[in-house]
Image (cartoon, grey):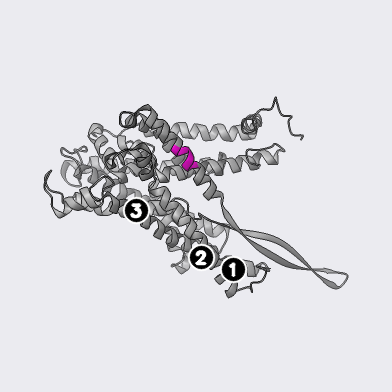
Amino acid sequence: MQRPARQGGMPKLFQAVIDSLHHPDLRRKLLFTFAILVLFRFLAHIPMPGVDTDALKGLFDDNAGFAMLDMFSGGALQKLGIVALGVYPYITASIIMQLLVPVVPRLQMLAREGEEGRNKINQYTHWLLVPLAIFQGYGQLVLMNAMFDPDPIPHLGLSGENFLPTVAMIVTLTAGTVFLVWLGERITEHGIGNGISILIFGGIVAAVPQNIYRNYDVFEFWGLVKLAILVMVIALFIVYVTEANRRIPVQYSRSTFRGGKVYRQSGGTHIPLKVNSTGMIPLIFAMAVMVFPGTIASYFVGAQGEKSFANFIYEDLFSATGDYWWFYWGAYFFMVVGFTFFYGMITFQQQNIPENLQKQGGFIPGIRPGKQTATYLNGVHFRLTWGGAIFLGLVAIMPLFAMVLMGSGIENAQSLMLLSSAGLLIVVGVVLDTMRQMEAQLLMRHYEGFIK
């Protein structure tokens, strides 16, 4: 099949979109993905009965942890909809399984068994998802009630007449999460892109108009324009670092037999080591750690105006807008850097690159196979991780950069959290991954794709 001729100098991106829509199979994948996203947004607006949603709005305006969870659910958590947990329990289960693989011998054996082993680990992840969703659902409901008076969820409790309504809410939240994970896997199988990431992407994008409307009175028109320019600059920065990698040259020696003689052939390739190999996971870890002390302290806060130790922890030390805001943002930065090294080293060790190279007859020029190769690759990865860690740390505290640009006070830093670091990383990552998949589909059909 010949590549269609360009029409009137149309930009390559738009022409590639038209090319993708012209092919029946690719068009079907795109429409299927779009239909699942529409269904997800419909489910996000179905609230559970017996919930005072007006009381919940203040919680999400003042709490960064709940705001992040609401982002993952696409705004469903703020309405306490039937899919209020989103796919966050599945992400937590996946992270736990990744951390368990290096320390559990049985999981290590499964990880080395190829596709069958990965499918088994994925099955364990799905089993772990259910209890995590149950505990997280109940914990969030209890925490929401603890932070408001009167309770926004009046029929919550595990005793008396509240038992059955509470069980019904927990079952509904768990079933909603399981259903969303199933929808995401259908996108992966029959649509375009990674399904779970696409659902998170849809929730983040859907929340943008609401965030802009909610913050219009704070920043006004020109303030939002400057904010939009800053978001685009940061997005370009994220794309640049996300795509950056160090190419390690690799040589392969092959032996062939011809006419009773052995001939050695050599071929070269490279191992791409990414600067940011951890994605958004360190940001999630760091946010969870930063939210935890304030959440615990919120159970013990005294009356308004009373300065107990719990009030100091909740209102000042672990608050993005408290008197010690510099401690919160500084600790957040260093937490992100630390978790980047921790998670990056774990995932890199799981790849077993030196062992796989030796099994396949590959070697790095000038480096002996085995232990020396492992030492060399670990050193290169450690140095690259410094760049990725500092990059993620700067992205994490970008609301402070926005505050300086806007000339705003620290009291508006929470409003600037619409510049969610995890959200921007997800959006950029999903767009790049989806473009690559569409690129591959188009190139298979002899079209010119999005990326050249």
Please give the residue where the numbered disc 3 appears in the rendered image: 332
The residue under the point 24% across, 36% down is: 58
- Does residue 395 show up? yes
**In the structure shown, which secondary structural element does the residue marked by tag 2 occupy?**
helix
The x, y position of residue 85, in whole percent, is: 35, 43
**Gap between marks 2 and 1, in whole Å?**
10 Å
For residue 372, above or below residue 226? below
Please give the residue where the numbered disc 2 appears in the rendered image: 349
Query: Amino acid type of disc 1?
Result: Pro
> What are the residue bounds of the magenta stretch?
230-235
Asked if the residue under mark 2 is in contact with the one under mark 3, i.e. CB atoms within 8 Å, the reply is no
Quarter of the rendering occupied by the C terminus: top right
Query: Amino acid type of disc 2?
Result: Gln
Please give the residue where the numbered disc 1 appears in the rendered image: 354
The x, y position of residue 1, in whole percent, is: 76, 35
For residue 300, above or below residue 373? above
The x, y position of residue 381, in whole percent, is: 53, 63
Q: Is residue 233 magenta?
A: yes
Report crowding for label 3: few under 14, some 14 to 19, many 20 or more residues within 10 A (C-alpha): many
Q: Which one is earlier in the sequence, the residue at label 2 or at label 1?
A: 2
Mark 1 or mark 3: which is in front?
3
Closest to the observer, 424 or 386: 386
Residue 151 as seen in the image, left or right of residue 413: left
